[in-house]
Image: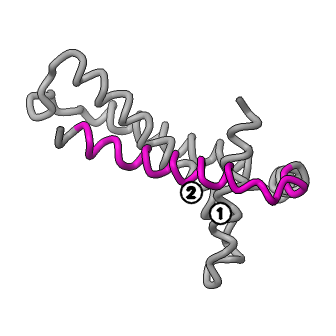
Amino acid sequence: MMKIYKRLYYNLYCIWLKKNDESENAHINAVITITFSLYVNIMNVLLIIFLMNKKDMLDLPELDSNVMLFIGVFLVAVGIFNYVLLGRKEQHNKIIEEFESEKDNKDGLYFTLLYILISFGMPFFILFF
């Protein structure tokens, strides 16, 4: 499972590396992209649970400040965890070395793009259909 996570990071890094104006920040942008896709996937799971229980999104109770604080701390912690796990220089270099030899693998790039498209498209699909 961790190899898939690292592969996703590597593919996102390669995508960001191709942008001329973002090449020096490609590793940070890859971490941010993974973190936001993780946030969206957590939201997707909650949306599917609401859909299965036939709950209306508009009838949900308001969140109190403690819950909102917990959610904020959780989201920041996930971002920091992703950076420590993937974006630090030592970890980043190990991941690059691990997958550099498989650079010609275009299937991984297509699956990464498909994953991002599905991750960010699913909430719209659930909400509108």
Task: Name the outermost residue toward the left.
Answer: 59
Q: Quadrant of the N terminus?
A: top right
Q: In this view, does 69 lie to the left or right of 125?
A: right
Which residue is identified by label 1?
Answer: 28
Residue 43 figure quarter: top left
Where residue 73 appears, x then y in whole percent?
47, 40
Residue range (magenta): 99-126
The kind of residue on which mark 1 rests is Ile
Q: Front-most of 51 and 104?
A: 104
Which residue is identified by label 2?
Answer: 32
Instruction: State if disc 1 and disc 2 touch (CB < 8 Å).
Output: yes
Where residue 15 appears, x then y in whole percent?
64, 65
Q: Which type of secondary structure does the marked residue at label 1 adopt?
A: helix
Where residue 28 appears, x then y in whole percent?
65, 63
Q: In this view, does 24 lie to the left or right of 102?
A: left
Tell me: residue 65, above or below residue 10.
above
Magenta stretch contains residue 79:
no
Q: Which type of secondary structure does the marked residue at label 2 adopt?
A: helix
Where residue 58 appears, x then y in whole percent?
10, 34
> How many angstroms separate mark 2 from mark 1 (CA)?
6 Å
The kind of residue on which mark 2 rests is Ile
The residue shown at (56%, 41%) is 77
Residue 101 figure quarter: bottom right
Q: In this view, does 115 lie to the left or right of 91?
A: left
